[in-house]
Amino acid sequence: MSTDKTFHQVLTSESPTRRLVMGILFILLGLAIILLFGVTTNPAAKTEFSLNPGGSAVLLPSIFIPTTATIYVMAILCAILGGVQLARGFKKYTSWILGVIILFFITCFLLWAAAGKSMNLAGLFVTTLGKSVPITLGAMAGIVCERAGIWNIAIEGMMLMGAMVACIVSSVLHNAWLGVLAGILSGGLIAMLHGLLSIKYKVNQIISGTVINIFATGFTSYINNKFMQTYENLNAPAIFKTFDIPLLVKIPFIGPILFRNNMYVYAMYIMLIVLTIILFKTRAGLRLRSVGEHPKAADTLGINVIRLRYIAVALSGAVAGFAGSYFTLGSVGRFDKLMTAGRGFIALAAMIFGNYMPGGAFSSGLLFGFADSLKDRLSILNVNIPSPFLLMAPYLATLIVLAGVVGRSTPPAAGGVPYDKEST
């Protein structure tokens, strides 16, 4: 009984250093809100937020918020929360409080950026969801692989290859679904190369992934320059159109945001549910996680560790190829050199930030998608921020997450460690 009590105290306790650092951070963020947004805003200004995405059946009234007063209230709340954190700490809820304060900071930034103007909040959420698709799918690809104990930093290359192959096949055959299938197969094929190098030949998994990324970058750039730029019929794919989910799309505000999209968004919803169920509610998921946590014990119980790891790597590549096909068949409608623009690496950050959980990956994908879509909205509002800084937004968010501000994730215990059956 005393052991359980001690363990509970360890889980809910907070070190004095963390309590001090986080408390000071909360107060500094409140001060930054005042200095950056409060004192530079017209006290009489109001910000209008529109709640109607395009094509909504039910029109909601816009919200008018007193800009300066709201900014100061949120800044004061940050300071109060910082004081409480310094005095007694929020213990296991500190990261949640930090998330709330970051939400305050983002809200104040939006209020400041749109002061005296109108911002379509619903439209911002629509673009956020769309831009989160490749990141979330890429993060799920990483989860499948890394839960089995194989680090996969080649998601960027797999996505890039999937984007190009899907574009070419869809352009030649004039069929978007066949393009998707080709993108999935190309991602799975290049993933098997990663599996062969890292599982059979025990090459360092980081090096193996880096080699694949370099190969995919060079190969796709060559094909694009040599053929796709010359023969335009190879770069004119059929693309997926948006369609409504009956009844659900009529829900005010959230209906058009969540249920008026193309098939990639709906596939993301399905994959989130299916992957969660498989990983944590089925025997196959338990076996997959076991070879990533303790492969020797799994082998002792009769689980074929090598085969299961190959399967996980292949599935990971297939999902990454599917994510890559989104760029050409679900978004842009053509292939451009290096069009994934580091989204595969951002997906890895989302996976780590989400603690290798499908739900966490989805939430993280939305965060990065928001940072990416925000730069477009700010450019429309003519905010006095240099465009290079706006372009940095999604990558800056990645750096902040990887710096471990919100918390530390726990990777699979055997992640990145080659398994040698003969040595057991």
Image (tube, rainbow, N blue to C red):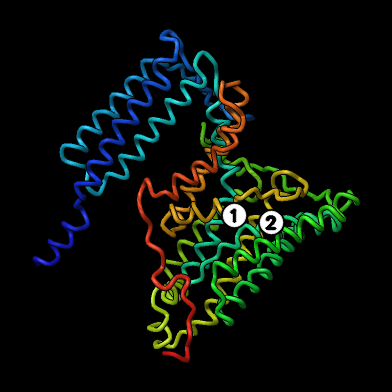
Q: Position of residue 23 (x, y in %)?
A: 25, 37
Q: CA distance from mark 2 to mark 1?
A: 9 Å
Residue visible at 20% across and 37% down in the picture:
86
Neighbours of disc 2 within 10 Å: few (<14), some (14-19), many (20+): many
Name the image quarter holding the N terminus.
bottom left
In the rendered structure, find residue 160 and report the number of the disc placed on it.
2
Q: Secondary structure at mark 1?
A: helix
Q: Nearer the viewer, residue 404 or 295?
A: 404
Determine whether 72 is above or below 233 in the image: above
In-image side of 140 versus 89 (left or right): right
Q: Position of residue 73 (x, y in %)?
A: 32, 21
Q: Secondary structure at mark 2?
A: helix
Residue visible at 75% across and 50% down in the picture:
337
The residue where tag 1 is placed is 344
Residue visible at 12% across and 67% down in the picture:
3
Mark 1 and mark 2 in contact (Cβ < 8 Å)? yes
